[in-house]
Image: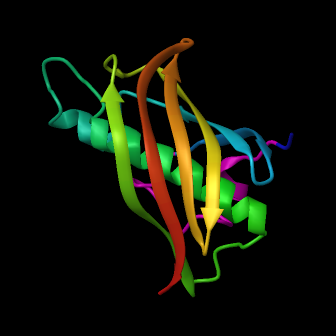
Amino acid sequence: MKSMNIEQIKEYLPHRYPFLLLDRIVEWEKDARIVALKNVTANEPFFQGHFPHYAVMPGVLIIEAMAQAAAMLGLLSTGQKNDGKSVYYFVGIDGARFKRPVRPGDQLVFEVEQLRLTRGMGKFRAVAKVDGKVASEAELLCTLRPV
């Protein structure tokens, strides 16, 4: 169990504002699981247009954040930091479901479990929760490839 702050996350992921969607790693276990956080604030750029009268975080961004958490698990497990020579790509999604809207002021907790790793391709089960209730879930495929 090891926590990481935003600056440590940036050592692994190439994403930057406004597309870095993780704020903290709460814990992780090599080749097994990771728990990450995203604090959803009213000043997120996407809330200006989605939707101005009832701000809701776009589902595709929740899925992207889950994929970033999966990438962190893969990268931390291999010890590979962001060297500019490779990218952990999000390459597939199965069974995505959205159970409740995510709104400003919510804290998303991403729980990602590695299901398998074969020839550099990882399959992960990801769940995003707010206040202990499932907001979204999916199975994700990610792979590390040279740029």
Left or right: where 78 falls relative to 48: right
Image quarter of the N terminus = top right
Which residue is located at x 64 percent, y 48 percent? 114
**Colour treatment of the image:** rainbow
Which residue is located at x 36 percent, y 50 percent? 93
* Residue 73 locus on image (x, y percent): 67, 54
Depth check: 50 or 77 in front? 77
Magenta residue check for 143:
no
Left or right: where 104 falls relative to 88: left
Query: Relative to 119, is 105 above or below?
Result: above
Q: How many marks?
A: 0
Query: Relative to 75, is 6 above or below?
Result: above
Q: Does residue 15 appear in the picture of this structure? A: no
Depth check: 17 or 66 in front? 66
Which residue is located at x 33 percent, y 29 percent? 97
* Residue 95 locus on image (x, y percent): 35, 37
Which residue is located at x 77 percent, y 44 percent? 28
Q: Does residue 129 appear in the picture of this structure? A: yes
- Residue 42's image quarter? top left
Depth check: 53 or 90 in front? 90
Depth check: 141 or 52 in front? 141
- The chief SS type of the magenta part is loop
> Which residues are the magenta region?
3-21
- Residue 13's image quarter? bottom right
Query: Relative to 31, is 110 above or below?
Result: above
Magenta residue check for 20:
yes
* Residue 86 locus on image (x, y percent): 55, 82
* Residue 60 locus on image (x, y percent): 29, 43
Left or right: where 140 falls relative to 48: right
Please, which residue is most extreme toward the right here? 1
